[in-house]
Image (spheres, helix red, strand yellow):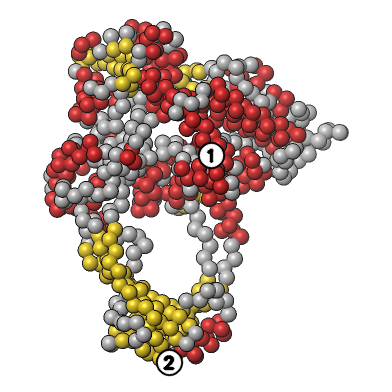
Amino acid sequence: MRLFIAEKPSLGRAIAASLGVIKNEKGYITCKNGDVVTWCIGHLLELAEPEAYDKKYKSWSLDTLPIFPKEWILIPTDSSKEQLDVVLEQIKKATVLVNAGDPDREGDLLINEVIEYANVSNDIKENALRVLINDLNSKAIETALNNLEPNSKRIPISNAALCRSRADWLLGMNITRACSVLAKRKGHDNVLHVGRVQTPTIQLVVKRDIEIANFKPVDFFEVEAQFTHADIPFKAKLQNKKRIDKKDLAESMITNITGQSATVTLCETKRAKSQPPLPFSLRTLQEAMSSKYGYGAKETLDIAQSLYETHKITSYPRTDKNYLSTIKEDEIQLIIENLEGLNDTPLAQWASDADMSLRSPCWNDKKLEGSAHTAIIPTTRAPDLDALSEAEHNVYTAIASRYLAQFYPTAEDDNTTIKIQSGEHEFKTTGKIEIKKGWRTVLGKEKNDTEEQSLPSLTKDQSIDCTNAEVISKKTSAPKPYTEGTLLSAMCNIGKEVTDPALKAKLKETAGLGTEATRAGIIEKAKEREYLTLKGKNIVSTPLAKMLVMALPNKVRDPAITAIWEQQLDVVERGECSVETFINAIEKTVQSLVDDLKSGKEPFTLSKSNAPACPQSGCTGFALPFEGKKSKAHQCHVCGTKFKDDNGKVGKAIKKIKKLDVKK
């Protein structure tokens, strides 16, 4: 029998519906022609904790670091044991396995690791197949099922995900333990989580918050003159190479130009055409929803996932692509007709006015080479807007609007620039007149588009009078706090934080920190661990985050680590580097980091806490709190002495860090 192993139940049921359902069983579905479909629930397996390799790792100690597993251990996740048993039982009966993971690195690995865990024969493993599904509607699934390819073709992609997972484990487990032990020595009772992507992300927010806290506004002054021609008054700003920081200097300039004749040195009008914004990738969708509605990155991802899985009205959301394949051109008419049928909605009117003969730059096969992903767009399934929540409706409307905009003409504006010379001073103004609305009929003007003043028609060398001038007092502005949307953008542009030109270029090429599929989870995990928190629409760092970032050596929090790893992961994905070679290189990096932390070569500059010192003679430890059954007390983190609380009671220690050995 052929066994299709899907990443999620929704995908499994959609595949089964296309194959022809015979009977729904617990955790799997029997289909026509002897096919069976089962599914994972995300990752059914996870990398084991260090203590699974050796009991000595239960105690956190510098002496046991670094931890480098010789044989990696996968264990069932707590929530998936029952479904894992179902999948393993079906694998035993199968003659052909079909990997139906999501069409990305993680989707390849997620199913492959279950196949490896099942310990199937090499023959079954080598003859496994792969199906790539971007759209959960029947026609798209049927097309995918008719184009199965060897699973072995994508093993290098799966290996890249495997390398990323193991490398993150190696860095996270070792450096988290090292930093937590060192922090404990200084009286801090916290697990200090360190991660390849999480730590540089937290650093971005900490750095921004410190810049805002330390910001001191500076006064400066602008000179604005008013000119009139043909009874049309307009304003122009003084062009100064340096910012004017003295008011009396600005006022002296006014005296020199008011009531004086000036000369037009440039009056130029150019027609500017602009194409519609590309359809959404996950990041650009998250940024737009954060800006417009204040939705968090994970919230938007969850909504987009629901539109894809539950309602089946949008395509696969975890995509970093803004482009569409020309193959999908045959869906245009049906998608637009479906939107046209949404009576009494703006989408219906926009769909009715769309020109299906137009092709915007989003239709570009070259931009999709080597990728199974496309931009997020409506599917051929007719949407039922009444079945959507308010948030789902908002996100769907945004996705559909971007798609419809691709079938509207370019927007056109006449942009006018005027330059005027008054003595030694040059003034400049610009104006914009919208000539053709084009795609703005659907999406409106960009947020930063402001109403432009009317400008007269002038000619070069024409004389013109300055009728008035004024000094405008201004102050420099502090950097804006991050929102989840702008933080996502900063993660993608992390190259700005790197000084090495080669690494800077790599980070730009690989789209920075994390991936389209993982960034929301990284931000969410940082919030769960109390490093980041929401303040209205803004996301800010906590005191714990500031303490961690300011204590860590630069090489531990440097985003360049991500650049180096991504370079090698690309090589693994191309099949030019083995898993073993990659992990050996990571182990050398982690070994160096651990050695430097142990020796103090890379100082962990955490200040001492306010915890009371241990009163035992000769002990340098701190009395840290723990909870007893009936009371709160303290225990020294070095000698282990328990201290009575005000009621004279001593409780049993409950430690945040498992048997943390800080004497070593």
Classify 10 Å Cα crowding around label 2: few (below 14), some (14-19), many (20 and above): some
- Identified at 31% across, 86% down, the residue is 229
Q: Picture coordinates of residue 4 (x, y %)?
A: 31, 17
- Identified at 43% across, 92% down, the residue is 260
Q: Quadrant of residue 214?
A: bottom right
Q: Left or right of 536: which side holds 618?
A: right
- Residue type at mark 2: give it: Gln
Residue 260 badge: 2
Q: Is residue 659 visible?
A: no
Q: Picture coordinates of residue 129 (x, y %)?
A: 33, 18
- Identified at 15% across, 48% down, the residue is 357
* Vertical relation: 171 (above or below) 87: below
Q: Which residue is mark 1?
A: 563
Classify 10 Å Cα crowding around label 1: few (below 14), some (14-19), many (20 and above): many
Q: Left or right of 200: which side holds 145?
A: left
Camera-side residue of 40 and 282? 282
Camera-side residue of 141 and 647? 141
Q: Picture coordinates of residue 486 (x, y %)?
A: 45, 51
> Judging from the image, what secondary structure is the residue with disc 1 in?
helix
Residue 247 badge: none
* Vertical relation: 366 (above or below) 169: below
Q: Quadrant of residue 616?
A: top right
